[in-house]
Image (cartoon, grey):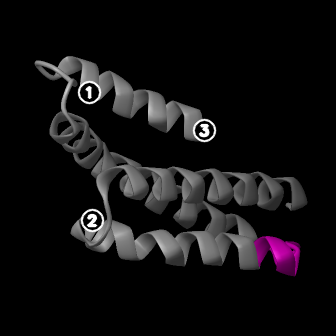
Amino acid sequence: MRSLIIASAASACLMLASCTTTGSLDTAIKNSLPKTCALLETAHAAFIAASASGNIKAKTLAKEKAAYDGVRVICADPSSVTAANALVVAATAYATVSLALREAKAAE
C-alpha cells in the first residue's frame, strides 16, 4: 500500500511541467497528501467498525491508534513537516491501519 501511495506521488510529479526542482516535488507531494489523509480516515473508520466485535488483539488496537494519532497531526497541519516526510509518515500510517483492518476483519 505504501508503494502505491509513493507511486501516486511520483506520477503526480511527472504530470507537472518538470520535477527537476525540489519545489516541484514538494508541490506534487503536498497535492497528494490530502488524498492520502482521506484514505487514512476511511481505513480508520472501517477499522473502528470492524473492531466493534471485541475480538481484536490489544497489540493491534495499540498499533492502529498510534499510527492514526501520529498522522492526524500532519494531516491537520501539513506545514508542520516537510512534504516528503509528511507523505512517508502518512503512507506508513495508512499501511499500519490497513493491516490492522485486515486483522479485525479476520477476527470477525
Look at label 2 and name its amino acid.
Pro
Along the viewing direction, whichever of 40 and 5 lies nearer the viewer: 5
Which quadrant of the structure image shows residue 25?
Answer: top left
Above or below, 92 relative to 58: above
- In space, the residues marked 3 and 2 are separated at their CA atoms by 21 Å
Quarter occupied by the N terminus = top right
Res. 13 mark: 1
Which quadrant of the structure image shows residue 20?
Answer: top left
Asked if residue 52 shows in the view, the reply is: no
User: Which dot, 1 or 3, sits closer to the camera?
Assistant: 1
Q: Position of residue 80 (x, y in %)?
A: 28, 72
User: Which dot, 3 or 2, sits closer to the camera?
Assistant: 2
Res. 1 mark: 3
Mark 3 Cα-neighbour bin, 10 Å: few <14, some 14–19, many ≥20: few
Along the viewing direction, whichever of 22 and 87 lies nearer the viewer: 22
Q: Which residue is mark 2?
A: 78
Query: Circle 2 sits in a helix, a strand or a loop, which is it?
Result: helix
Please give left or right for residue 40 compared with residue 100 in the image. Answer: left
The stretch in magenta equals 52-61
Please give left or right for residue 28 compared with residue 65 in the image. Answer: left
Q: Residue at x 74, y 60 (%)?
A: 100
Report if the CB atoms under discs 1 and 2 are less than 8 Å apart.
no
Q: Residue at x 29, y 73 (%)?
A: 76
Mark 2 Cα-neighbour bin, 10 Å: few <14, some 14–19, many ≥20: some
Query: Circle 3 sits in a helix, a strand or a loop, which is it?
Result: loop
Lower position in the chain sequence, tag 1 or tag 2: 1
Above or below, 99 relative to 1: below
